[in-house]
Image (tube, rainbow, N blue to C red):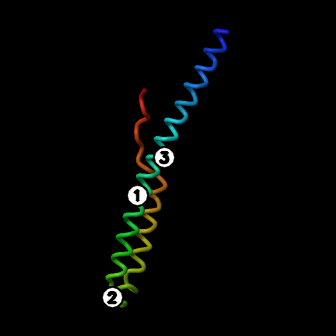
Amino acid sequence: MAQKGQHTETEWQAQREDLLIAIDQLEQMTEVMGEVLCRVKQQMHILENHTPSAKTSSKKSSGQRRSSSKSQASNPPKKPDLVH
């Protein structure tokens, strides 16, 4: 009977670690998405304040910015694992 209790405890610890890892990953994703949302809002603000002639000249540069933002979003900053 003692083995069953240890087995259950081991399973519980493994599930707890998995949940802590998932929480950390979700926090990282939330941080990255918040940064992306902020950049999108800034771009919208910039585009709303541009004159029609300025919009045509800025299309190429905004496309370049978009591709660099995409590469940053796909590689979120690494955080150390939680130590418990």
Residue appearing at x 52%, y 40% in the figure: 22
Under circle 1, the secondary element is helix
Question: How far apart are the two marked residues, 3 and 2, measured between alpha carbons?
Answer: 39 Å
Q: Position of residue 56 (x, y in %)?
A: 40, 86
Q: Is residue 57 above or below residue 3?
A: below
Gap in angstroms between the C-alphas marked 3 and 1: 12 Å
Name the quadrant containing residue 38: bottom left
5 relative position to 60: left or right: right
Residue carrying label 3:
26
- Report which residue position mark 2 lands on: 51
- Give the residue drawn at x 66%, y 14%: 4
Residue at the spot of label 1: 34
The label number, if any, that marks residue 72 in the structure image: none
Give the image location of residue 48, x and y in percent: 36, 81
Q: Tag 1 or tag 3, which sits nearer the N-term?
A: 3
Q: Which residue type carries mark 2?
A: Thr
Residue drawn 44% across the image and 68% down it:
66
Q: Earlier in the sequence, mark 2 or mark 1?
A: 1
Residue 8 location, quadrant: top right
Dividing the picture into quadrants, the one containing residue 53 is bottom left
Looking at the rendered structure, the secondary structure element under dot 2 is loop
